Image (tube, rainbow, N blue to C red):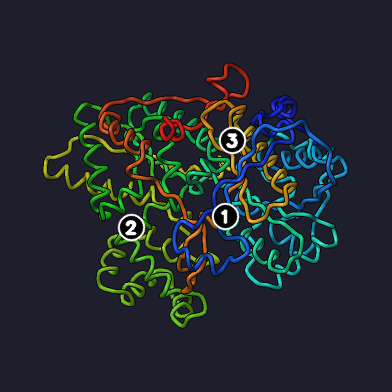
Amino acid sequence: MNISALEKERLKYQPKLPVSLKGIGKLVEGSKTESVADQKEIKELFPNTYGMPIISFEVGDEAIERAPINVGVILSGGQAPGGHNVISGIFDGIKNVNQKSKLFGFLGGPGGLVDHKYIELTADIVDSYRNTGGFDIIGSGRTKLEEEWQFDKGLEIAKDLDLNSLVIIGGDDSNTTACILAEYYEAKNSGVQVIGCPKTIDGDLKNEMIEASFGFDTATKVYSELIGNIQRDSNSAKKYWHFIKLMGRSASHIGLECALKTQPNITLISEEVEKKQQTLDEVVSYMAGIISKRAENGDNFGVALIPEGLIEFIPEMKILITELNDLLADGTKTERDFKHLKKSHRIAWVAEKITDESSKVLLSLPSGIASQLMLDRDPHGNVQVSLIETEKLLGEMVKTKLSEMKKSGEYSGAFGTQYHFFGYEGRCAAPSNFDADYCYSLGFTASVLVAEGKTGYMSSVRNLTLPADEWIAGGVPVTMMMNMEKRHGHMKPVIQKALVELDGAPYKYFKSKRGEWAFNTCFIYPGPIQYFGPTEVCDPTTETLKLEQA
């Protein structure tokens, strides 16, 4: 395999571990837990794994060799920087328990478990992927494990390979699945444990016990470097407004973190838009007002950050999307009729089938954006938000608004736009030192949870703003994070998503500064991720965590 000079050097990097993981460690159990909401319903659904205590590891004796443990690992969902280091941590952790322990990787995500497709991950394989980005060591996938026959197929291969445990590395849905599997296997007294690891660059899998999902640090640093480069270009050419859409369908953590790192002129926070019940026109007017004010100072340029899922947080757009999802649901007569129409007739046809309010919103949109709302649905039957060019929607509507303001004498500047979407650029980057350390610790922690016979837990590493030696490793029961939500018309247990907290320190700091950043040019240019050099340059965590734990 041909690798770059940087990759060769990164293979040599030894991730840092909490001191409690350097020996065998001592397990400490806290008090019993309960779910964040819907306690009665969650307890009934998870009688064998509900109410378990939070676990932490403290410094214990030197490592003592114990019986071998065999673990199967699954990468689930979209990629996030550091996944390979989670696997490296699991591998080193189980070898620390006993050199005869084995690690098996299921290929292509959860589907590999059901289809019995796997490889044994040997030292030669694992060593060639340490500190690298991507999930290519075994691949990932989005197969949903929902049926008992799938669980039983997984149990078959687990028994064939003599697995003690499965470790599922994924986001909130994947870790919900891990909890359901843990409960199912525990009810069967199968002897197969299930442990989860928190992954998502979106940053919406977090709570008091999961301070950060892995990959968020690296991805936001990659995006911030690109934003900084564009800000430098904008400040040099002084003739364009750059509208940048950033990943984050369900929450605006990425946009907020990148804003704290780069100080752009405009950053939209979906959660704020929803709380204020802002209309699309109000959002556009807010942006046009800043652009006009800067133009008064001769600054006909700037940068605006837009979260990917913004339109689903605008009440009128949310209603429109819900109506479209129902109207164009797979297999319905209206969906079949819609597909037989000429593309030029579709918008008018749909406008007649929905409520008057939603019809007005649909017809007010640029035709290209309106058409994007009617693209094929995702596997859940919902609009594919990532395919909607929200940045262009806002750019075109701002341009129209500024033209109206110019006619009334409220605006006299020049408005030119450039559009960008930063998404895949950050998902497989080589992990930052922080993510390399954090992910390795998460994997190592998972191995200790397995060795201690635990199931239904998510690997947890806390105190992340302190040096790695002082991090607190342990486990949190997945049921503790759950509530009931409506999915496909049925109430189901899911891990509660973490949105940007509007009364939290990161948002409050951003809010106190955004006026200054809007009208002045206060750009910060973070530059690329640094892997070698001073600790303050190479190892810092996110601005969000610093403010949360200040």
- At which x and y percent is residue 420? 45, 42
Which residue is tagged 2?
366
- Name the amino acid, label 2: Pro
- Name the amino acid, label 3: Ile
- At which x and y percent is residue 451? 75, 46
Q: Which residue occupies the foreground of this view, 450 or 109? A: 450
Q: Residue furthest top?
A: 534
Which residue is tagged 3?
472
The alpha-carbon separation of the residues under discs 3 and 1 comes to 18 Å
> Which callout, 2 or 3, points to the residue nearer the camera?
3
Q: Which residue occupies the foreground of this view, 16 or 434? A: 16
Look at the numbered disc 1 and give the secondary structure of its residue. helix
Q: In which quarter of the image is the N terminus?
A: top right
Which residue is tagged 1?
478
Look at the numbered disc 2 and give the secondary structure of its residue. loop
Q: Is residue 97 left or right of residue 340?
A: right
Q: Which residue is pictured at 84% across the width and 57% down the height?
A: 162
Q: Which of the 4 image quadrants contains residue 539?
A: top right
Q: Which residue is pictured at 84% across the width and 46% down the height?
A: 68
Q: Residue furthest left?
A: 408
**What is the crowding at mark 3: few (fewer than 14 residues within 10 Å), some, or many (at least 20)?**
many
Mark 3 vs mark 1: which is more N-terminal? Answer: 3
**What is the crowding at mark 1: few (fewer than 14 residues within 10 Å), some, or many (at least 20)?**
many
